[in-house]
Image: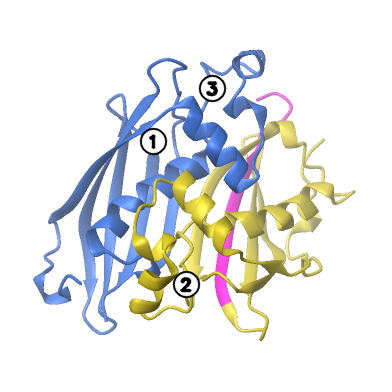
Chain colours: A yellow, B blue
Amino acid sequence: MAVNPELQGREFAPTAPYLVGREKVREFSRAVFATNPINLDPDAARAAGYADVVAPPTFPVVVQEHTLAQLLAEPDAGIDFSRVVHGDQRFTYSRPIVAGDELTATLTVSSVKTLGGNSMVTADSVITDASGAHVVTAISTLVVRGDDA
Amino acid sequence: MIAFTSLTVGDVVAEQTFHLTRDSLVRYAGASGDFNSIHYRDDIAASVGLPGVLAHGMLTMGVAVQTVVNWIGDPGRVQDYQVRFTRPVVVDPTNGADVTVVAKVAALEEDGQVARIDLTATYEEQTVLGKAQVRVLFA
């Protein structure tokens, strides 16, 4: 089954709020070999001008995961997860994520392209805080291999 | 903090090697919530035609940027970070995998005091990330 080209432009419902926990930031930091005290120690983070420990640059993937689950579960999407390869990833920040943030992600499929039997699906997850202000946009391009590939 | 004015396009500002093991993959699976079994089970990886258990692309991405964070000393100054996943990192169960990251100044935006730092990440002499660009705020 091919990826449905009508997915392009589709916007999904915002995800349930995700509360960024201090221990989660520490856990994620250790997993990506982040050793900076600003990632791990609230006092060091405050001394550097942040409200609490700062999440590593790729942390939004944890929140983005929920939006990609929405996309894969979309009945008419035609995306077979076993054929999906992660092609590109980008994070564009308005401000860093810190422990205590309550984040909501809204997914839009910005593009669906077919290239030599494969489909490329670009999914933009716009992540905002409890006040509605933009924090970061996480952009994933998924390559969905065609039946013959 | 490093002074923006001290930067020159073309300079290599940091280089670091990260040793990934199967333990690293399990830890990242738990922390990120990505439990795709090709990242910890040899039998599943083999059944889908992979040369072995692979590191999560997002783990490689997340680790590579630490080279820049360690250089600038503040993870909150990364404004933008993008990569293309061009080649998988196969993590040997005994020996793991070494990923070496070189960070080079690619462009300087005087107005916003933003530097674009490009990363080259290599594993077994081959690059594993393409278009790996980090925008860092110095203001």
**Do callouts 2 and 3 mark residues in contact (Cβ within 8 Å)?**
no
Q: Which mark is residue B53?
A: 3
* Residue plotted at (44% across, 29% down): B89
Give the left or right position of residue A45, taking residue A55 as reference. left
Give the left or right position of residue B35, taking residue B94 as reference. right
Residue A44 is covered by the magenta coloring: no
Query: Which of B120/B52 is in front?
Result: B52
Quarter location, residue A83 = top right
Name the element at disc 1: loop
How packed mark 2 is, by other alpha carbons closer than 10 Å (few <14, some 14-19, many 20 or more), is some
Q: Is residue B131 visible?
A: yes
Name the element at disc 2: loop
User: Which residue bears the numbered disc 1?
Assistant: B128
Report the amino acid beneath label 3: Val
Between discs 1 and 3, the one toward the N terminus: 3
Residue B107 % position (x, y):
23, 66
Report the amino acid beneath label 2: Pro
User: Which residue bears the numbered disc 2?
Assistant: A96
Q: Are marks 1 and 3 on the same chain?
A: yes
Query: Which of A6/B59 is in front?
Result: B59
* Residue A76, placed above or below residue B110: above
Query: Which of A60/A123 is in front?
Result: A60
Residue A82 % position (x, y):
72, 31
Quarter location, residue A131 = bottom right
